[in-house]
Image (spheres, helix red, strand yellow):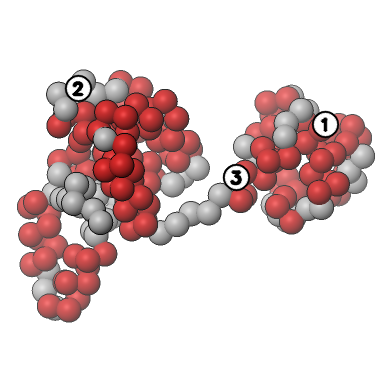
């Protein structure tokens, strides 16, 4: 959670945080404004801010420290997780974790929509009803069609749009709903 969200949640001003924590007000303002990256602050500063906000030091830096891998890596990791856990355990794990909404709130739209598409696809495959919690996110759609890297490479090498057209025809509907072309989620190595 970022520091501005914590301040709003605690109904605390930057001035009050500076006074209570002993961290200079200019430093607090720079952190809140993004001029100073919180993950670059000293342990002492993080400790003082965390203590005054009533959270752990990890909570202060978790958003900044989260690495966003490429979309292809994300997709591969999701498919491997499905393979390792099995459909039902995967669905339960994703829904209980709140990961779809967390990614969406971070504006990581391709990842969020891919994960929701996977849950919806696996639900259909297993005869389960759709989780109603994500109706608002289901109305979202990526502005540009996202093709697998392999399809893009084949189109470039062949100097033809045929691989893209073929992949669109074979795409899983739950993924296409979000403008993501995906046709194979089971055969991962």
At x 89% / y 32%, what residue is drawn? Answer: 20
Q: Name the one closer to the observer, 87 or 28.
A: 87
At x 33% / y 58%, what residue is drawn? Answer: 72
The N terminus is located in which quarter? top right
What separation in Å lies between label 1 and label 2 (alpha carbons)? 46 Å
Residue that mark 1 sits on: 52
Residue that mark 3 sits on: 63
What separation in Å lies between label 1 and label 3 (alpha carbons)? 19 Å
Quick one: label 1 or label 2, which is nearer the N terminus? 1
Q: Is residue 128 visible?
A: yes
At x 61% / y 51%, what residue is drawn? Answer: 65
SS at mark 2?
loop
Q: Name the one closer to the observer, 19 or 149.
A: 149
Q: Position of residue 99 (x, y in %)?
A: 43, 35
Location of residue 8 (image quadrant): top right
What mark, if any, has residue 34 been given in the picture?
none
SS at mark 3?
helix
What mark, if any, has residue 128 been given in the picture?
2
Q: Nearer the viewer, mark 1 or mark 2?
A: 2
At x 62% / y 43%, what residue is drawn? Answer: 62
Q: Residues within 10 Å of mark 1 (few under 14, many from 20)?
A: some
In the rendered structure, the answer to whether residue 24 lies left or right of residue 153 reads: right
Q: Are marks 1 and 2 in contact (CB under 8 Å)?
A: no
């Amino acid at each position: 959670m970022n520091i501005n969200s914590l301040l709003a949640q605690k109904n605390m001003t930057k001035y009050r945080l500076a006074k209570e924590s002993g961290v200079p007000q200019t430093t607090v303002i720079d952190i809140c404004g993004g001029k100073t990256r919180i993950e670059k602050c000293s342990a002492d500063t993080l400790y003082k801010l965390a203590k005054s906000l009533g959270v752990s030091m990890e909570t202060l830096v978790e958003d900044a420290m989260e690495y966003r891998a490429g979309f292809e890596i994300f997709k591969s990791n999701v498919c491997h997780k499905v393979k390792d856990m099995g459909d039902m355990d995967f669905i339960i794990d994703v829904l209980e974790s709140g990961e779809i909404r967390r990614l969406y709130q971070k504006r990581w739209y391709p990842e969020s929509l891919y994960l929701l598409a996977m849950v919806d696809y696996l639900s259909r495959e297993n005869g389960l009803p759709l989780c109603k919690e994500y109706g608002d996110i289901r109305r979202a759609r990526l502005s540009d069609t996202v093709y697998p890297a392999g399809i893009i490479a084949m189109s470039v090498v062949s100097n033809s749009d045929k691989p893209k057209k073929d992949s669109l025809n074979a795409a899983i509907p739950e993924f296409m709903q979000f403008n993501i072309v995906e046709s194979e989620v089971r055969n991962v190595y």
